[in-house]
Image (cartoon, rainbow, N blue to C red):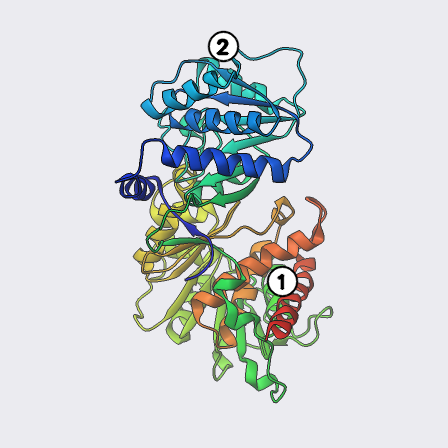
Amino acid sequence: MQGVGLYRVEELRAVEARATEGLPPRTLMQRAGRAAAESVVRRYPDARRVLILCGPGNNGGDGYELATRLKQAQRDALCVALSPPIADEARGARALWDAAGGITAPHLPTGQPFDLVVDAMFGIGLTRPLRAAYLDAARWMNDQAAPVLALDVPSGLDADTGAWVGGVQGVLADATIAFIAAKPGLLTHAGCDASGAVEVADLTIELPAPTGWRNGPEHFRSVTAPRRRDTHKGSFGDVAVVGGGVGMLGAPLLAARAALRLGAGRVYVECIGAPALRLDPLQPELMFCPSASLPRADAWVVGCGLGSDAAAQAALRAVLVRADTVVLDADALNLLAAGAVLLTRSDQTRVLTPHPLEAARLLGADAAGVQADRIAAARALAHRHSAFVVLKGAGSVVAAPDGRYWINPTGSPALATPGSGDVLAGMIGALLAQGFYPLHALLAAVWLHGAAADRFGGDVGLAAGDLPSLAAAALAELRRASSVAR
């Protein structure tokens, strides 16, 4: 697949070992320094005074290489080494910096303004939490008015998981330049805030095919293709939404409205807690009927506000018997985790949409354990339930049953509002009902859901009911671009 591939530390170590065979020492470090210098000049053209904090390993060596090149470009660079370099290549880079007349201070400067601060303390190999002088340095960087650029990985961040190593917060960068390839931890969990804008410098190294990617429209081109004109509502499938226990009628209505906005041909709703409900005044196009009376549905969405009582369990079992394609959300996941229902059909296309606590219940773990490795949790759920999974949260993780995964880059804190998950479930159901390949439908829905929040612009004030129209506008924009490209 095209797009930005994601590589874990173990994979990158193997790639780097193969790449350095036959190359002169420090070749990759020199390439990294050159790429970082080019990034600084391009991204921060007015940054004349640059402070670079260099660690004792090869990440620090990258920092010395950057400093040497910035000095050559007539930038005023200053290095800070809280401890001397211990890696051979880092010592070589430090020697060249010294030979060029570079200045290296043994402690953090006070009272000196800088236009840019560069974090070159620790890279992908960090296994212990930041402490002592390095923790102080991270906090100092976070307090600076100047922007912070991280080399490869913000110091203190687990490159694989996006969690802070040992639970200790490290550097919060405004931008990160990732060497060789993007790391999954840059895009999810704490990495979303720690990494800032991420760019990749491949250092001209050939990479094997990845098993993970950053999600984007290149991964769901079928969804972004404009519709044919010779169609009608029957061309775009039927969605059945089942949920709405007593006091929770809003949840299935939000899902159903989203399914309609995202292009489903017909949308049916059953609110088990209000069987007499026959009209949604805000969306009169929705049709209300008992799901048992439906002759068919191309995609079922079940669980939004469903509840956990006997009626909820019966409704969920009935859907699982009938549905060839089903989205399991909210209470459906909790009932599954409790063992109240079983997934027995091997021919069923399933999508699970848990947040971290729901995922923890399904895995018999706790939410902190899920967050400690979101990718592993999503992949485990996909494998265990033979399902496509989206683990919601900052940097939502989409996992396929075969082990592949994607991390979604769109979205904002504005999505942390009641009902946004119901909307996502309805969006997924709509794209599934239209006949798109399940993985493409899921990737598109997750990306568009986040893009809707991005279009809103703020980080507070977005209501879940606003999302469907914003998502539809984002899809229309992609389809216009696709039409022009054709």
Q: How many marks?
A: 2
Relative image position of residue 207 (x, y in whole percent): 35, 51
Relative image position of residue 76 (x, y in whole percent): 62, 22
The residue depicted at 46 percent of the width and 24 percent of the height is 121
Kind of residue at disc 1: Leu
- Is residue 435 placed above or below 336 in the rendered structure? below
Answer with the quarter of the image where residue 263 lies: bottom right
> Element type at marker 2?
loop
Query: What label does residue 106 carry, if any?
Result: 2
Nearest the eye: 297 or 265: 265
Nearest the eye: 157 or 82: 82
Relative image position of residue 394 (x, y in whole percent): 53, 45
Q: Which residue in the structure is indicated by mark 1?
A: 254
> Element type at marker 1?
helix
- Is residue 486 placed above or below 33 in the rendered structure? below
**Residue 414 seen from this side:** yes
Kind of residue at disc 2: Pro
